[in-house]
Image (cartoon, rainbow, N blue to C red):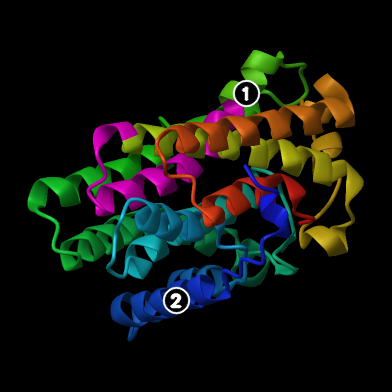
Amino acid sequence: MTDAMTVPIDFGADRARVARALDALVARCLDGRDGAVYEAIRYSLAGEGKRLRAVLVLSAYRAAGGTGDVSDLAAAVEVVHAYSLVHDDLPCMDDDAMRRGRPTVHVVHGVAAATAAGMAMVPLAARAAADAASALGLDAEEVSAIVRELMRASGAGGMIGGQLLDLEGEGRALSLEELERVHRLKTGALIEASMALGGLAARAPAPLLEAFRRYGAAIGLAFQIADDVLDITATTDQLGKTAGKDVEYRKSTYPALLGVAGAKARAEALVQEACAGLQGQGALTPELEFLARFVVARRS
Protein backbone atom coordinates (compact mmCIF):
# COMPACT_ATOMS: atom_id res chain seq x y z
CA MET A 1 0.00 0.00 0.00
CA THR A 2 1.12 3.54 -0.75
CA ASP A 3 1.11 6.44 1.65
CA ALA A 4 -2.37 7.47 0.58
CA MET A 5 -2.28 10.76 2.48
CA THR A 6 0.35 12.00 0.01
CA VAL A 7 -1.95 11.28 -2.95
CA PRO A 8 -3.72 14.51 -4.00
CA ILE A 9 -7.30 13.23 -3.94
CA ASP A 10 -9.96 15.95 -3.88
CA PHE A 11 -13.49 14.92 -3.01
CA GLY A 12 -14.85 18.42 -3.55
CA ALA A 13 -16.79 17.36 -6.65
CA ASP A 14 -18.36 14.42 -4.79
CA ARG A 15 -19.32 16.62 -1.86
CA ALA A 16 -20.83 19.18 -4.23
CA ARG A 17 -22.90 16.47 -5.95
CA VAL A 18 -24.21 15.29 -2.59
CA ALA A 19 -25.02 18.86 -1.54
CA ARG A 20 -27.03 19.34 -4.74
CA ALA A 21 -28.82 16.05 -4.15
CA LEU A 22 -29.72 17.12 -0.61
CA ASP A 23 -31.01 20.46 -1.88
CA ALA A 24 -33.13 18.66 -4.47
CA LEU A 25 -34.46 16.26 -1.83
CA VAL A 26 -35.47 19.15 0.42
CA ALA A 27 -37.15 20.93 -2.49
CA ARG A 28 -38.97 17.77 -3.58
CA CYS A 29 -40.19 16.68 -0.16
CA LEU A 30 -40.39 19.83 1.97
CA ASP A 31 -41.25 22.73 -0.34
CA GLY A 32 -44.58 24.26 0.63
CA ARG A 33 -44.41 22.75 4.12
CA ASP A 34 -44.19 25.28 6.91
CA GLY A 35 -43.63 24.97 10.63
CA ALA A 36 -40.83 24.55 13.15
CA VAL A 37 -40.27 20.85 12.41
CA TYR A 38 -39.73 21.43 8.69
CA GLU A 39 -37.48 24.40 9.38
CA ALA A 40 -35.46 22.24 11.78
CA ILE A 41 -35.03 19.56 9.08
CA ARG A 42 -33.92 22.16 6.53
CA TYR A 43 -31.46 23.63 9.02
CA SER A 44 -29.96 20.25 9.90
CA LEU A 45 -29.47 19.23 6.26
CA ALA A 46 -27.90 22.56 5.31
CA GLY A 47 -25.04 22.20 7.80
CA GLU A 48 -21.64 21.75 6.24
CA GLY A 49 -19.79 18.57 7.14
CA LYS A 50 -17.16 16.16 5.93
CA ARG A 51 -19.81 14.09 4.09
CA LEU A 52 -17.59 11.07 4.76
CA ARG A 53 -20.42 8.56 4.69
CA ALA A 54 -21.81 9.93 1.44
CA VAL A 55 -18.38 9.92 -0.18
CA LEU A 56 -17.93 6.30 0.93
CA VAL A 57 -21.14 5.36 -0.91
CA LEU A 58 -19.82 6.97 -4.09
CA SER A 59 -16.32 5.49 -3.71
CA ALA A 60 -17.57 1.96 -3.02
CA TYR A 61 -19.92 2.17 -5.99
CA ARG A 62 -17.07 3.16 -8.30
CA ALA A 63 -14.76 0.50 -6.83
CA ALA A 64 -17.41 -2.14 -7.60
CA GLY A 65 -17.61 -1.00 -11.21
CA GLY A 66 -20.69 1.22 -10.96
CA THR A 67 -20.98 3.85 -13.67
CA GLY A 68 -24.21 5.67 -12.80
CA ASP A 69 -24.90 8.59 -10.48
CA VAL A 70 -25.52 7.47 -6.90
CA SER A 71 -25.55 10.98 -5.42
CA ASP A 72 -29.21 10.63 -4.41
CA LEU A 73 -28.47 7.41 -2.53
CA ALA A 74 -25.49 9.04 -0.84
CA ALA A 75 -27.76 11.93 0.15
CA ALA A 76 -30.14 9.48 1.85
CA VAL A 77 -27.26 8.33 4.03
CA GLU A 78 -26.50 11.94 4.92
CA VAL A 79 -30.11 12.41 6.04
CA VAL A 80 -29.68 9.54 8.51
CA HIS A 81 -26.38 10.93 9.71
CA ALA A 82 -27.87 14.41 10.15
CA TYR A 83 -30.77 12.98 12.15
CA SER A 84 -28.33 11.22 14.46
CA LEU A 85 -26.51 14.48 15.12
CA VAL A 86 -29.77 16.32 15.87
CA HIS A 87 -30.71 13.76 18.51
CA ASP A 88 -27.16 13.32 19.82
CA ASP A 89 -27.02 17.03 20.65
CA LEU A 90 -30.33 17.16 22.57
CA PRO A 91 -30.25 18.15 26.27
CA CYS A 92 -31.30 14.62 27.28
CA MET A 93 -28.34 13.20 25.34
CA ASP A 94 -24.99 15.03 25.01
CA ASP A 95 -26.57 18.47 25.53
CA ASP A 96 -24.34 20.29 23.05
CA ALA A 97 -24.87 23.85 21.85
CA MET A 98 -22.54 23.73 18.83
CA ARG A 99 -22.22 21.41 15.84
CA ARG A 100 -20.27 21.96 12.64
CA GLY A 101 -19.33 25.43 13.81
CA ARG A 102 -22.87 26.75 14.34
CA PRO A 103 -25.64 26.48 16.96
CA THR A 104 -27.24 23.05 17.20
CA VAL A 105 -30.75 22.44 15.90
CA HIS A 106 -32.48 22.45 19.30
CA VAL A 107 -30.78 25.72 20.24
CA VAL A 108 -32.17 27.40 17.11
CA HIS A 109 -35.55 25.69 16.75
CA GLY A 110 -36.32 24.33 20.21
CA VAL A 111 -36.12 20.89 21.77
CA ALA A 112 -39.58 19.73 20.69
CA ALA A 113 -39.06 20.66 17.03
CA ALA A 114 -35.55 19.15 16.98
CA THR A 115 -36.80 15.89 18.50
CA ALA A 116 -39.66 15.63 16.02
CA ALA A 117 -37.42 16.61 13.12
CA GLY A 118 -34.99 13.82 13.91
CA MET A 119 -37.82 11.29 13.99
CA ALA A 120 -39.22 12.56 10.68
CA MET A 121 -35.83 12.33 8.97
CA VAL A 122 -35.70 8.53 9.27
CA PRO A 123 -38.70 7.84 6.97
CA LEU A 124 -37.49 10.69 4.77
CA ALA A 125 -34.19 8.85 4.33
CA ALA A 126 -35.97 5.56 3.63
CA ARG A 127 -38.06 7.21 0.93
CA ALA A 128 -35.00 8.90 -0.57
CA ALA A 129 -33.06 5.62 -0.64
CA ALA A 130 -35.93 3.74 -2.30
CA ASP A 131 -36.38 6.44 -4.92
CA ALA A 132 -32.64 6.60 -5.60
CA ALA A 133 -32.29 2.83 -5.94
CA SER A 134 -35.27 2.65 -8.29
CA ALA A 135 -33.83 5.45 -10.42
CA LEU A 136 -30.68 3.37 -10.86
CA GLY A 137 -32.74 0.64 -12.50
CA LEU A 138 -32.51 -1.83 -9.62
CA ASP A 139 -35.32 -4.34 -9.27
CA ALA A 140 -37.79 -4.45 -6.37
CA GLU A 141 -35.76 -6.97 -4.37
CA GLU A 142 -32.58 -4.94 -4.80
CA VAL A 143 -34.38 -1.72 -3.80
CA SER A 144 -35.74 -3.46 -0.72
CA ALA A 145 -32.24 -4.70 0.21
CA ILE A 146 -30.89 -1.15 0.04
CA VAL A 147 -33.64 0.29 2.23
CA ARG A 148 -33.26 -2.55 4.74
CA GLU A 149 -29.51 -1.94 4.92
CA LEU A 150 -29.96 1.74 5.69
CA MET A 151 -32.72 1.19 8.23
CA ARG A 152 -30.81 -1.59 9.98
CA ALA A 153 -27.85 0.72 10.44
CA SER A 154 -30.02 3.52 11.80
CA GLY A 155 -32.15 1.44 14.16
CA ALA A 156 -31.91 -0.51 17.39
CA GLY A 157 -29.43 -2.92 15.83
CA GLY A 158 -27.18 -0.02 14.82
CA MET A 159 -26.97 3.65 15.77
CA ILE A 160 -29.90 3.79 18.21
CA GLY A 161 -28.75 0.67 20.00
CA GLY A 162 -25.23 2.06 20.22
CA GLN A 163 -26.50 5.39 21.54
CA LEU A 164 -28.43 3.60 24.29
CA LEU A 165 -25.36 1.61 25.29
CA ASP A 166 -23.35 4.85 25.28
CA LEU A 167 -25.82 6.54 27.64
CA GLU A 168 -25.89 3.51 29.92
CA GLY A 169 -22.10 3.56 30.03
CA GLU A 170 -21.81 7.13 31.31
CA GLY A 171 -20.20 7.37 34.73
CA ARG A 172 -18.88 3.81 34.79
CA ALA A 173 -15.75 2.13 33.53
CA LEU A 174 -16.29 0.01 30.42
CA SER A 175 -13.95 -2.71 29.28
CA LEU A 176 -12.33 -2.37 25.87
CA GLU A 177 -14.68 -5.07 24.56
CA GLU A 178 -17.74 -3.17 25.87
CA LEU A 179 -16.48 0.11 24.47
CA GLU A 180 -15.92 -1.38 21.02
CA ARG A 181 -19.41 -2.85 21.04
CA VAL A 182 -20.86 0.61 21.76
CA HIS A 183 -19.00 2.28 18.94
CA ARG A 184 -19.29 -0.46 16.34
CA LEU A 185 -23.01 0.26 16.64
CA LYS A 186 -23.20 3.98 17.40
CA THR A 187 -20.59 5.15 14.88
CA GLY A 188 -19.54 2.13 12.86
CA ALA A 189 -22.92 0.82 11.72
CA LEU A 190 -23.70 3.69 9.34
CA ILE A 191 -20.15 3.83 7.99
CA GLU A 192 -20.28 0.08 7.32
CA ALA A 193 -23.70 0.51 5.68
CA SER A 194 -22.37 3.30 3.47
CA MET A 195 -19.88 0.90 1.94
CA ALA A 196 -22.48 -1.84 1.63
CA LEU A 197 -24.94 0.51 -0.07
CA GLY A 198 -22.38 1.47 -2.69
CA GLY A 199 -21.72 -2.18 -3.33
CA LEU A 200 -25.39 -3.14 -3.47
CA ALA A 201 -26.13 -0.30 -5.89
CA ALA A 202 -23.37 -1.60 -8.19
CA ARG A 203 -24.53 -5.22 -7.80
CA ALA A 204 -21.19 -6.22 -6.28
CA PRO A 205 -20.61 -9.98 -5.87
CA ALA A 206 -20.94 -11.40 -2.36
CA PRO A 207 -17.17 -11.66 -1.58
CA LEU A 208 -16.60 -8.01 -2.53
CA LEU A 209 -19.67 -6.90 -0.62
CA GLU A 210 -18.38 -8.68 2.48
CA ALA A 211 -14.97 -7.01 2.04
CA PHE A 212 -16.74 -3.65 1.81
CA ARG A 213 -18.56 -4.38 5.06
CA ARG A 214 -15.34 -5.34 6.85
CA TYR A 215 -13.61 -2.21 5.56
CA GLY A 216 -16.52 -0.06 6.74
CA ALA A 217 -16.65 -1.70 10.16
CA ALA A 218 -12.90 -1.24 10.66
CA ILE A 219 -12.70 2.39 9.61
CA GLY A 220 -15.91 3.14 11.50
CA LEU A 221 -14.24 2.05 14.72
CA ALA A 222 -11.04 3.87 13.77
CA PHE A 223 -13.14 7.01 13.19
CA GLN A 224 -14.54 6.84 16.72
CA ILE A 225 -11.11 6.26 18.24
CA ALA A 226 -9.86 9.34 16.40
CA ASP A 227 -12.87 11.27 17.74
CA ASP A 228 -12.00 10.25 21.30
CA VAL A 229 -8.43 11.43 20.81
CA LEU A 230 -9.52 14.73 19.26
CA ASP A 231 -11.95 15.35 22.13
CA ILE A 232 -8.99 15.76 24.48
CA THR A 233 -6.34 17.10 22.09
CA ALA A 234 -8.23 19.60 19.89
CA THR A 235 -10.05 22.85 20.67
CA THR A 236 -13.73 23.65 20.25
CA ASP A 237 -12.88 25.96 17.33
CA GLN A 238 -10.92 23.19 15.60
CA LEU A 239 -13.67 20.60 16.12
CA GLY A 240 -16.66 22.80 15.34
CA LYS A 241 -18.33 21.29 18.41
CA THR A 242 -17.66 21.44 22.14
CA ALA A 243 -14.39 19.79 23.11
CA GLY A 244 -13.97 17.90 26.37
CA LYS A 245 -17.49 16.45 26.48
CA ASP A 246 -16.25 12.90 27.15
CA VAL A 247 -14.54 13.98 30.35
CA GLU A 248 -17.53 16.09 31.38
CA TYR A 249 -19.87 13.12 31.04
CA ARG A 250 -17.36 10.69 32.56
CA LYS A 251 -17.44 8.46 29.50
CA SER A 252 -15.09 5.57 28.93
CA THR A 253 -12.85 6.37 25.96
CA TYR A 254 -10.03 4.77 24.05
CA PRO A 255 -7.40 7.24 25.35
CA ALA A 256 -8.59 6.54 28.91
CA LEU A 257 -8.24 2.79 28.40
CA LEU A 258 -5.19 2.67 26.10
CA GLY A 259 -3.54 6.07 26.46
CA VAL A 260 -3.36 8.50 23.56
CA ALA A 261 -0.47 6.65 21.90
CA GLY A 262 -2.17 3.29 22.36
CA ALA A 263 -5.46 4.61 20.98
CA LYS A 264 -3.71 6.00 17.91
CA ALA A 265 -1.93 2.67 17.39
CA ARG A 266 -5.24 0.80 17.60
CA ALA A 267 -6.77 3.14 15.02
CA GLU A 268 -3.82 2.69 12.67
CA ALA A 269 -4.08 -1.10 12.99
CA LEU A 270 -7.75 -0.91 12.02
CA VAL A 271 -6.88 1.16 8.94
CA GLN A 272 -4.32 -1.45 7.89
CA GLU A 273 -6.91 -4.18 8.43
CA ALA A 274 -9.49 -2.33 6.34
CA CYS A 275 -7.14 -1.72 3.44
CA ALA A 276 -5.70 -5.24 3.48
CA GLY A 277 -9.19 -6.72 3.16
CA LEU A 278 -9.98 -4.69 0.05
CA GLN A 279 -6.54 -5.34 -1.39
CA GLY A 280 -7.27 -9.04 -1.15
CA GLN A 281 -10.29 -8.50 -3.40
CA GLY A 282 -8.39 -6.27 -5.82
CA ALA A 283 -10.68 -3.39 -4.81
CA LEU A 284 -8.36 -1.09 -2.86
CA THR A 285 -8.70 2.03 -4.99
CA PRO A 286 -6.55 5.08 -4.19
CA GLU A 287 -9.60 6.97 -2.96
CA LEU A 288 -10.71 4.20 -0.58
CA GLU A 289 -7.18 3.96 0.80
CA PHE A 290 -7.10 7.73 1.19
CA LEU A 291 -10.44 7.74 3.01
CA ALA A 292 -9.30 5.01 5.41
CA ARG A 293 -6.20 6.99 6.31
CA PHE A 294 -8.15 10.25 6.46
CA VAL A 295 -10.38 9.04 9.30
CA VAL A 296 -7.38 8.89 11.63
CA ALA A 297 -5.33 11.77 10.18
CA ARG A 298 -8.14 14.37 10.26
CA ARG A 299 -8.08 17.32 12.67
CA SER A 300 -11.82 17.76 13.17
The answer to whether residue 236 is seen in the rendering is yes
x%, y% of residue 212? 41, 39
Image quarter for residue 248? Answer: top right
Residue holding disc 2: 17
The answer to whether residue 186 is seen in the rendering is no
Image quarter for residue 259? Answer: top right
> Can you tell which mark lies on residue 180?
1
The three-letter amino acid code for the residue at tag 1 is Glu
x%, y% of residue 294? 67, 52
Circle 1: is it few (<14), some (14-19), or many (20+) Cα within 10 Å? some
Disc 1/disc 2 C-alpha distance (Å): 33 Å
Q: Which residue is drawn at 73% across and 27% down?
A: 266
x%, y% of residue 79? 44, 61
Image quarter for residue 92? Answer: top right
Direction from residue 137 to residue 205 in the image, left or right: right
Disc 1 secondary structure class: helix
203 magenta-colored? yes
State which region is magenta: 182-207
Q: In which quarter of the image is the C terminus?
A: bottom right
Query: Can you tell which of label 1 and label 2 is closer to the viewer?
Result: 2
The three-letter amino acid code for the residue at tag 2 is Arg
x%, y% of residue 213? 42, 35
Q: Which residue is drawn at 54% across and 61% down?
A: 114
